[in-house]
Amino acid sequence: MLLQLLLTVLPLVHSHYNWSPTAAATQKFEWRPARATYYAPVDPRDAVGGACGYGDLERSGYGKSTAGLSTVLFEKGQICGACFEVRCVEELKWCIPGTSIIVTATNFCAPNYGLESDGGGHCNVPNAHFVLPIEAFEKIAIWKASNMPVQYRRIKCRKEGGVRFTINGAGIFLSVLISNVAGAGDIVAAKVKGSRTGWLPMGRIWGQNWHISADLKNQPISFEITSSAGVTLTSYNVAPKNWNFGQTYQGKQFDS
């Protein structure tokens, strides 16, 4: 996948929050059991690209605090951008006591149905499994542990700067990658608006890539996004009138 050009443009942006009392109750996430493995630095599977579409994870701000998730956790890509706290449990021989890590879902760990779920098919259904960069894994366990029992829970994401909107496409086809999302981290609905249009709903293609066919050239663009916590964020004039494909623009940010 081509690397995304992170050119942040900061026009005058206004933001509105819509907090749902029902959504607040869903923030009570409990620890759940899973397992975790790691990949070595020589394995580039999560450095560039990935099933969430974030491109170069270093350049896009995610670094090594990332995870590939098994099928039961990945939710067909809807979970992309969500944050998890992960800690080592049970195997006291390998665990680093009192430690945990916070990672963002950026990739998919595909199942291997040539192996049994308990015999090498780590990411097969019904396993809850995290594949971590070794740099993250070694913060909670000794690398020799390999396939470790862990506990995980959803937490609010903390991000620097605003939500990023990377606009790709051609002509009237727009594909917008939404990244660097605080709060719930994952987006479940998105709308776009030009200065000569009303609010237009977008469809999710894969990961956190959203698309629409609409003529928005030579118009400042606004975005309205809703997180899985039911919080809606409206940022006006995120991209200026002279916006271009291949650029990243920054809006306001969810509370974290």
Image (cartoon, grey):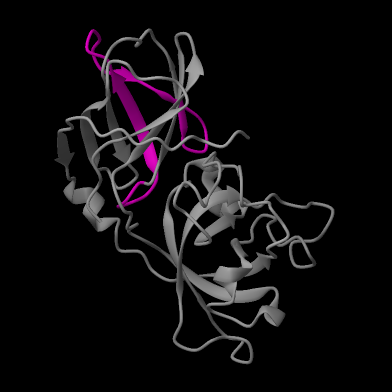
Judge from the rendering whether residue 196 lies leftward or rightward of residue 115; answer left or right.
Answer: left
Q: Is residue 234 magenta?
A: no
- Expressed as whole percent of the image width and height from the top left, the position of residue 90 reads 58, 86
Nearer to the camera, 60 or 112: 60
The residue range painted magenta reads 181-210
- How many discs appear? 0
- Expressed as whole percent of the image width and height from the top left, the position of residue 14 reads 15, 33
**Looking at the image, residue 90 lies above or below residue 86:** below
Question: Based on the displayed image, in which of its 4 quarters is residue 69 positioned?
Answer: bottom right
Q: Is residue 186 magenta?
A: yes
Nearer to the camera, 238 or 91: 238
Residue most extreme to the bottom: 93
Residue at 58% x, 70% y: name it.
135
**Looking at the image, residue 13 lies above or below residue 83:** above
Question: Based on the displayed image, in which of its 4 quarters is residue 11 positioned?
Answer: top left
- Expressed as whole percent of the image width and height from the top left, the position of residue 157 reads 35, 57
Judge from the rendering whether residue 12 lies leftward or rightward of residue 33; answer left or right.
Answer: left
- Expressed as whole percent of the image width and height from the top left, the position of residue 129 reads 61, 62
**Looking at the image, residue 58 lies above or below residue 167:** below
Residue at 70% x, 55% y: name it.
124
Q: Quadrant of the N terminus?
A: top right
Q: Quadrant of the C terminus?
A: bottom left
Nearer to the camera, 127 or 161: 161
